[in-house]
Image: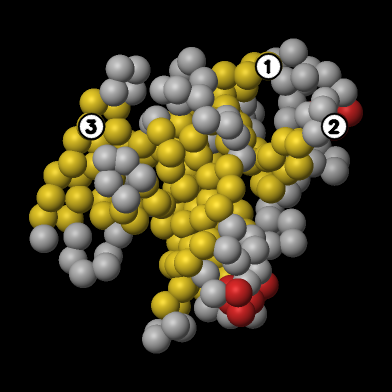
Amino acid sequence: MHRRIRMLGLAAVLTLAATVFGSSPAMAATVETGHVDVFDLDYDAANDSLTLDIKTYAPENDDVSPAGTVIRVAPTSTATIPGGTAWQCLGAAGSTVYVAPQTLVADRLYAGWNSTDLPAAQGPVKLELTGWSGPAGSRFALYTTAGFPATPSFKFNTNTAAGCPVTVWPSGVAAGTHAHGNWAFSTAGTYTLTFRATARNGAGASSGLVTYTFQAG
């Protein structure tokens, strides 16, 4: 089954060009606005297999392959790093980073993760950042915020400063989770990040290495 899906927005474009056979993920070109689960975890009990792909919600609810897909954080989607020791691992206070925010904001990427189709017995999922590349001197971080004043909890962080690197999702991704976070990039440019998901906290089925491409700015 061959299909092409195209949606035009006021400030951004989400284009899906899909070639789907059976339950294989579709192929997307660029995702840069609206609700998307960057880490979509699915388990096939019949084959004891775990998959890691992207889940889109509009214009169609679909699984999308990270291969050939660019996840873009728009040039206007920026934030200023607050002061305080809790934020030091994100960067220097007062500096600007590109961020797909944790909360829904019109015309911005609303990116999260989804393990609602994962049986409880297969969780938590060990999710690892196994390698990455980006512009010279750049950094990537995925973090959530809570409380007032808000403080960050890092899921991944490529900052090499002492106490900052996070390459394995703390405590794993629990089964039955659907949540959102802040996806931060320090510098405009293209980032390539490779992840591996393994069920049963590293003792079960593995997705193998899955590479994502992000564009900041």
Question: Of the residues under marks 2 and 1, which one precedes in the sequence?
Answer: 1
Identify the disc placed on residue 86. 2
Quadrant location, the N terminus: bottom left
Give the left or right position of residue 142, taking residue 38 as reference.
Answer: right
Q: Does residue 135 show up?
A: no
Give the left or right position of residue 59, taking residue 203 as reference.
Answer: left
**Do labels 1 and 3 touch, CB within 8 Å?**
no
Q: Which colour scheme is used?
A: secondary structure
Up-down: is 42 above or below 214?
A: below
Give the left or right position of residue 16, taking residue 49 as reference.
Answer: left
Type of residue at label 3?
Met
Residue found 25% across the figure and 36% down from its top: 15
Residue found 46% across the figure and 18% down from its top: 75
Identify the disc placed on residue 80. 1
Type of residue at label 1?
Thr
Question: Of the residues under marks 1 and 3, which one precedes in the sequence?
Answer: 3
Secondary structure at numbered mark 2: helix
Bin the neighbour count of mark 1 within 10 Å (Cα to Cα): few under 14, some 14-19, many 20 and up. some
Identify the disc placed on residue 7. 3
Give whichever of 121, 29 is nearer the camera: 121
Residue 79 place in picture, x, y as percent: 63, 19
Counting labels gives 3
Residue found 74% across the figure and 26% down from its top: 91
Up-down: is 60 above or below 51?
A: above
Residue found 53% across the figure and 61% down from its top: 115
